[in-house]
Amino acid sequence: MNLNLRGAWSILTNELFRFFRTVFGSILSPVLTTSLYIVVFGAAIGSRMDPSQFGGASYGAFIVPGLIMLTLLSESTSNASFGIYMPRFTGAIYELLSAPVGVAETLIGFVGAAAMKSLIIASIILITARLFVDYSIAHPLYAAGYVVLVAAAFSLFGFILGIWADGFEKLSIIPMLILTPLTFLGGTFYSVKMLAEPWRTIAQFNPVFYLINGLRWCFTGHSDVPIGLSLACTLGFVALCIAVIAYIFRTGWRLRG
């Protein structure tokens, strides 16, 4: 089956135009929130932290990857879930289902746009962080590839969430009650080595812990787990999301009827 690039491009550009119509509010809130985290934790508290606890990096540089990951997860999920939920809410999903657009084109359009939005915001936060924290990126190519992979993974997850939700309140219940707490408990502001048992072991059952440490390795060259394990967890999550989406389109679950 040939890929309908024109259909995928139409969905992608439509979603991006919607983002740029509200670009000020879409960017200002996450950038301002993350900047406050950097100022409060990185500058005020970080000056009292021992760099030896963080692989020789300053505390401010240590939390930058975690804060970027926090933004990637929340923005990718919310953008993708809202993007596919609105056509379902307005009934436009039936036009999409009857159009010559397959699963691949739909994912390229909705998931690609959501990932691009979150990457734009993450890039702005990375630049803004330079105003407050002196950090470096030990493996820039790995970092670029890894953030793209994570953005795609959670855009896929958000796409599933947007299909599952049958009301606006459900769009926020998973990110608010599950995703955000897991991110904060996954080592955004600390190293798991600082925890006492049994919390150190419990923290390693948190999947977000491996995502944060993967990006932290890209920035500082040090992490609490091997980069290969972090990459394997991310790729496994992508494969799982793609399998679920394939099932949804094959059965029409929540799309028809």
Image (spheres, helix red, strand yellow):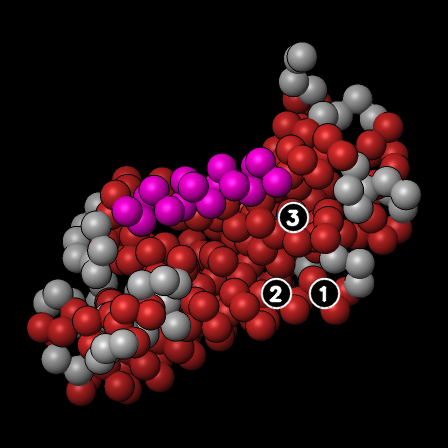
The answer to which of marks 2 and 3 sits earlier in the sequence is 3
Structural distance between the alpha carbons of marks 1 and 2 = 7 Å
Q: Secondary structure at mark 2?
A: helix
The answer to which of marks 3 and 1 sits earlier in the sequence is 3
Q: Residue furthest top?
A: 1
Q: Which mark is residue 160?
A: 3
Structural distance between the alpha carbons of marks 3 and 1 = 12 Å
Start-end of magenta stretch: 229-244
| Crowdedness near tag 1: few (<14), some (14–19) or many (≥20) residues, C-alpha within 10 Å | some
Residue 165 position in % (x across, y down)? 74, 57
Chief SS of the magenta region = helix
| Crowdedness near tag 3: few (<14), some (14–19) or many (≥20) residues, C-alpha within 10 Å | many
Above or below, comparing residue 118 to residue 112 in the picture: below
Can you identify the residue that label 1 sits on?
A: 170
| Crowdedness near tag 2: few (<14), some (14–19) or many (≥20) residues, C-alpha within 10 Å | some
Residue 242 position in % (x across, y down)? 57, 37
Is there a contact, CB below 8 Å, between mark 1 and mark 2?
yes
Mark 2: amino acid: Ile
Q: Secondary structure at mark 1?
A: helix
